[in-house]
């Protein structure tokens, strides 16, 4: 796995991911998750839906960056991911993380390819931006897919420790047991990295979309620990 993908998947990378729970805060507020034993189902489901979608577009973006595509391709990739993200709150969270990652990425991997992407989409979706950075750094579509797929579960897992005071050893064990599923999701994403953006898969999760919208409404009325 390329070092760039590892850096981008590191919770210490200043991309702003630490302020997002991936829907877990709303799920906990509804008392749907209370213990470590409740986490595997949520994390696996998130990996297979939102995580899979992110992996697909990160892989496609890494493929595009390696080829040095024209600006129109970046605009198309971003628009296709927008179309596959029906929740406005989810779209905003993705773009907020994309913008944060772009600031750190410019410092770590300056590139004309990155500048072209940001000129067309100043607030790109996070998977598109992360995939581009991996491709710019010499990583593969599979590397990019692994990175975002891992973030899809590691972020909520970390949030669970903070929100519920769960045993961090037990929570990280849950994440470790998802390794086979994560590899499967990343491999499937890498297999379609070169497809036309309009033909990329569109896995979705209506429940996560509804939780995201509910969290956004509630966040306006009371202080929440996470932005999403």
Image (cartoon, grey):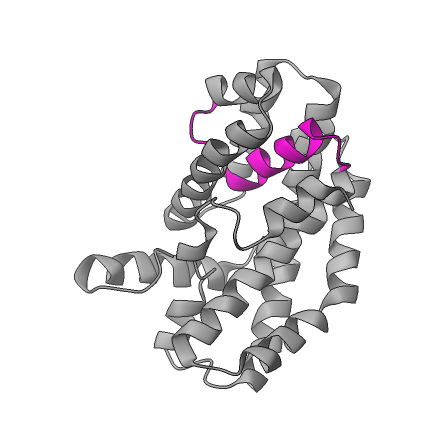
Q: Please state if 19 lies on the left or on the right of 38 as rendered.
A: left
Q: Is residue 177 visible?
A: yes
Q: Is residue 198 visible?
A: no
Residue at 35% in and 75% down? 29
Q: Is residue 190 above or below residue 80?
A: below
Query: How far from the left and from the top, in percent, is residue 105?
Result: 54, 33
Residue at 73% in and 60% down? 182
- Asked if residue 89 is among those painted magenta in the image, a careful observer would answer no
Residue at 74% in and 55% down? 185
Q: Please state if 169 lies on the left or on the right of 27 as rendered.
A: right
Q: Nearer the viewer, residue 155 or 51?
A: 155
Q: Is residue 172 above or below residue 150?
A: below
Query: How far from the left and from the top, in percent, is residue 4?
Result: 67, 40
Tell me how many marks there are: 0
Q: Quadrant of residue 21?
A: bottom left
Query: How far from the left and from the top, in percent, is residue 224?
Result: 28, 64
Range of magenta residues: 121-140
Q: Is residue 33 above or below residue 115?
A: below
- Identify the image quadrant of the C terminus: bottom left
Q: Is residue 77 above or below residue 185?
A: above
Q: Nearer the viewer, residue 35 or 215?
A: 35
Q: Quadrant of residue 97?
A: top left
Q: Nearer the viewer, residue 49 or 121?
A: 121
Q: Please state if 217 lies on the left or on the right of 176 as rendered.
A: left
Query: How far from the left and from the top, in percent, is residue 42?
Result: 56, 72
Q: Quadrant of residue 127?
A: top right
């Amino acid at each position: 796995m390329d070092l760039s993908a590892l850096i981008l998947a590191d919770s210490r990378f200043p991309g702003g991911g630490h302020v997002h729970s991936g829907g877990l805060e709303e799920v906990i507020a509804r008392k749907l998750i209370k213990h470590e034993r409740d986490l595997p189902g949520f994390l696996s489901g998130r990996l297979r839906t939102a995580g899979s979608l992110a992996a697909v577009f990160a892989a496609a973006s890494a493929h595009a960056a390696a080829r040095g595509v024209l600006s129109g391709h970046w605009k198309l990739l971003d628009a296709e991911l927008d179309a596959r993200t029906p929740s406005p709150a989810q779209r905003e969270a993705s773009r907020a993380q994309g913008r944060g990652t772009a600031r750190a990425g410019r410092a770590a991997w300056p590139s004309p390819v990155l500048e072209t992407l940001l000129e067309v989409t100043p607030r790109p979706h996070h998977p598109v931006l992360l995939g581009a950075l991996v491709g710019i750094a010499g990583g593969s579509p599979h590397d990019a897919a692994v990175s975002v797929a891992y973030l899809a579960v590691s972020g909520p897992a970390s949030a669970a420790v903070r929100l519920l005071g769960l045993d961090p050893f037990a929570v990280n064990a849950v994440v470790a047991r998802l390794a086979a599923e994560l590899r499967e999701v990343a491999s499937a994403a890498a297999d379609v990295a070169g497809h036309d953006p309009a033909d990329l898969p569109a896995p979705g999760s209506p429940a996560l979309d509804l939780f995201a919208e509910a969290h956004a409404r509630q966040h306006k009325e009371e202080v929440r620990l996470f932005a999403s």
